[in-house]
Image (cartoon, rainbow, N blue to C red):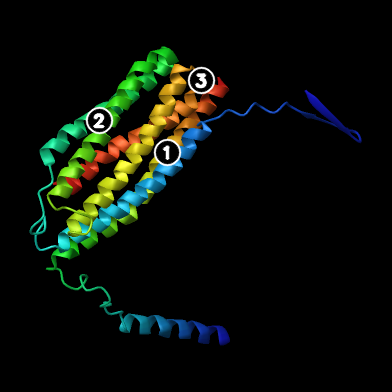
Amino acid sequence: MRRGACSLGLLALWAAGLCLPATAALACSVCTDPDDPRAKAYFDMTIFMSLFPLLAMGIVGIWLWRRVVAAEAASAR
Amino acid sequence: MESVVRGDLRLVHPPPKPRQQVVPNEVLGVTIFILTELMLFAGFISAFTIAKSSAPMWPPPGQPRLPLEATAINTVALLLSGALAWWAGRRFDRVGPASARWPMVATLGLGAFFVLFQGYEWVGLLREGLTLTSSNQGGFFYLIVGAHGLHAMGGLTVLTVMSVRLVQEQLDSGAFWAGRLFWYFVVLLWPVLYVLVYR
């Protein structure tokens, strides 16, 4: 009984979440105006600053991993 | 073969394998340093791109045009210096340290030419009115190109020390690799900054 009530409560919460979708936050002045010339620059630089460190660390990680594999292969010989 | 007797059991441990160094410590240290410096320049590039896109006119009114053509020659000199550093590394590994001397000296010479030419260019731009506070363009130009110039001067110091140690036959392979790695960073970063800032 108590478990059923808990499930019903969660279901109601989920339904409320669907009925009350989040509205766009207006914190950033350029995000809301697609015609603003800065919007593309902000978007591009957000992507760049998000992906660039991952790419740089990934390249170094792959390089180190390949060197480890080569060293292991050399020591196995 | 090391053995330890415990009660009835006789545990036999094979001797530990000698640890093989995958990457010299100097190279790993410089790689991590380069990663942090890359993020510094990524931040500069990001801020510059947004500032440039926010400006109604670029270059801002009353500001001089950056010397695109003259700097192209300087860019070629720096790229050539990077290629010579790479060749010096190959000769060091394949022929011997003595054979890497003259490519290293040529690398140093071209690197010094790049920094001196930049200084000459800056004097001209300052005379034309492009200062750190004259406009957004001036501020970003001296910040980004200046930060790269400081790295180039640091790289030149490293190249000088390496060249002296190479002549004295005291340069080991790991230190040489690490020094060249930093110079490659200085060389390969420049074309990106040149295209972004001077264009």
Residue hosting label 1: A62
Callout 2: chain: B
Q: Are marks 2 and 3 on the same chain?
A: yes
- What residue appears at the point 22 percent right and 39 percent down from the top-left corner? B118
Gap in angstroms between the C-alphas marked 1 and 2: 35 Å
Q: Are marks 3 and 1 on the same chain?
A: no
* Disc number placed over residue B113 in the picture, else none: 2
Gap in angstroms between the C-alphas marked 3 and 1: 32 Å
Of badges 2 and 3, the one in the foreground is 2
Type of the residue with mark 2: Phe
Q: Is residue B96 visible?
A: no
Gap in angstroms between the C-alphas marked 2 and 3: 27 Å
Q: How many marks?
A: 3
Callout 1: chain: A
Q: Say which of B143 and B174 sits in front.
A: B143
Q: Identify whether B191 is placed above or below A13.
A: above
* Disc number placed over residue B170 in the picture, else none: 3
Query: Residue A74, position in %: x, y?
Result: 53, 22
Q: Identify whether B34 is placed above or below B88.
A: below
